[in-house]
Image: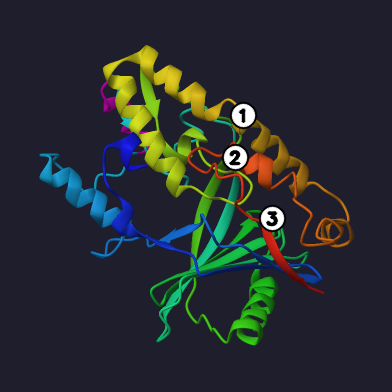
Amino acid sequence: MKEYIGIDVEPCFSELKKFKAYIYSKVVHFNPNHLYVTKRGSQKDCIDYFLYKTAVDEGVNFEFSHPLTSETIRSIPENSIIATGSYSSLYRPLGLRHTPFIHLDSSLETQENNDFCIAYFDTYLAGYGYAYLASKEGFVSVELDFLATQPYEKHLKKFNEQVKQNENLEFCTWALVPDFIPKEITLWKKVHGKTYILAGAISGFHDPLFGFGVNSALISGKIAALSILSKARGAQEFKQFSTNLQRMFLLSKVYHHLPLKKIFIPHLFSNTKHKLPMIGMNLQNVPGFTHENCFEIINIDR
């Protein structure tokens, strides 16, 4: 990553020590090698602050409290980079195909200095049937995703109970965040007679199945910058990293509409030697996430 984007972000990342997933009736333990965790936010130990400080040191001027809206987008100069993330309300004004949903966020600090990730897949997790916890140096964050049209209160309660029972963690305060899932991958978008460059989640340049986005965002930012200097070079790099990403969008759609998940999915985890094609090979299509041994199964509890 340092070689590609020209910024040494290694201090922001820690290697995972543990990665497991509660997948319906089974608990699957994955090899954490080649997997890393980072902390997001405005605190000084977060990657967001690290990148902000790096930009300031390079002479970039920041102006906060000026949200980009459908009304103000007309004032943005042509060839500007729009990197507003998946929370943006600009999907419709930009003419981007998307699915509205909500996610619930929470966090807590523990006395244990563990770096781990825990995923949950179950039918009671309505909508996308997916939640995850990530911990870096004792700071634990959690996210649950739900379709915007579905109630979530009883599912949140059950999830809280399961996490407390399995991990002895209790999240008390939750933030509800309206969000959007893009349905396509877009580098340039023409609106109001101007062409803009899209970067990060709003461009669809991320993992649509599990929501991995940090690696993709870093690479996407580099490509957006290249596109300002050379449209042809930007297009070349974008194509190189996103050609097979559409397969992940298709796989995500198939998974979300798959009937009888509770019966079908556990059968995919029959033994530790079984390499899942929907995880192994396809995750190599996620920009910046390419190691062939990622998500190697080391143990399965039935």
Going from the N terminus, do you reach mark 2 or mark 3 first? 3
Residue 253 inside the magenta-drawn segment: no
Disc 1 marks a residue whose amino acid type is Asn
Circle 1 is placed at which residue position?
A: 244
Residue 283: quarter of image:
top right
Residue 246: quarter of image:
top right
Distance between the alpha carbons at the discs numbered 3 and 1: 23 Å
Going from the N terminus, do you reach mark 3 or mark 1 first? 3
Tell me the mark number nearer the camera, choosing from 2 and 1. 2
Disc 3 marks a residue whose amino acid type is Tyr
Distance between the alpha carbons at the discs numbered 2 and 1: 9 Å
Q: Which residues are magenta?
A: 69-77
Q: Are marks 3 and 1 in contact (CB under 8 Å)?
A: no
> Does 65 appear above or below 199?
below
- Depth check, front residue: 164 or 72: 164
Per the rendering, the mark at residue 284 is: 2
